[in-house]
Amino acid sequence: MMRIFLTISMLWLAMPAWAAGGDNEYIEQSGANVENLASLQRGAATFANYCNSCHSAQYMRYQRLAQDLELTEAQVEEFLIFGDRELTDYMKAAMPGESKDWFGVVPPDLTLTARSRGGDWIYSFLKSFYMTEEGWNNTVLENASMPHVLWELQGIQRPILETWTDDSGEEHTRIAQFELDQPGKLNAREYERTIRDLTAFMIYLAEPAVLKRESLGIWVILFLVVFTFLAYLLYKDYWQDVRK
């Protein structure tokens, strides 16, 4: 029984590594922390100001944000709600019709993006836009139809290419790094914090229960440890009588 418990524990500890990786060489660890309420509040403001115009979060109500993020209803109405929407409304896109005209399709709902893609993917995607002669591109999602909506914050970066040769002698070209061509309103560290906060908020969007689940998780693990220890003692006591 103890061996089974140790095996389950090792698998549980390894799960974040499975979920975070992917095989894209441009994926970076976000460091997003959903337990940091200040980070979630900043991320919610960024989402409302830069994402919610085109993208919906149709499974989340503004009222729920007030409850979970410890904001007053007045703060939510002032900083997160625009137009004629109400506190009890879902976070639907402000301009769905215009977005379809611009891009040809309605931009996808972002409620569950963190569950399907992962927080590291979102963070890396928002960090990896670069300008080409044809327009915006992205190392994480090549030829994405989405423009870089945060470019005023990050600035405009252009790729520096390098050539490398594989084992078969074939040459390839890849992006080695980025060069800032036009500075944004934020420096690199400030922009990384901004998209880290936005990533944390989107992780929360995908699973609002994560705020309580992670705090309860420690107690559940402690309970399992204590229960396993007591079960092991009972196991020894029981088989001690049987073997006699």
Image (tube, rainbow, N blue to C red):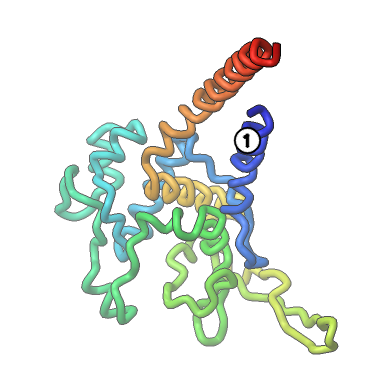
Q: Considering depth in this image, is 123 or 191 the residue closer to the camera?
A: 123
Q: Considering depth in this image, is 6 or 30 the residue closer to the camera?
A: 6
Task: Residue lying at the far front in this picture: please name it.
Answer: 244
**Image position of 174 with respect to 185: above or below:** below
Q: Can residue 164 be seen from the camera position used here?
A: yes
Q: Quadrant of the N terminus?
A: top right
Residue position for label 1: 9
Look at 54% across and 56% down and name the residue there.
123
Q: Position of residue 184 (x, y in %)?
A: 54, 62
Q: Position of residue 180 (x, y in %)?
A: 63, 68
Left or right of 76 in this view: 223: right
Look at 45% across and 54% down and name the residue there.
114
Q: Can residue 184 be seen from the camera position used here?
A: no
Query: Which amino acid does the dot numbered 1 rest on?
Result: Ser
Identify the image quadrant of residue 65. top left
Q: Position of residue 215 (x, y in %)?
A: 47, 28
Q: Quadrant of the C terminus?
A: top right
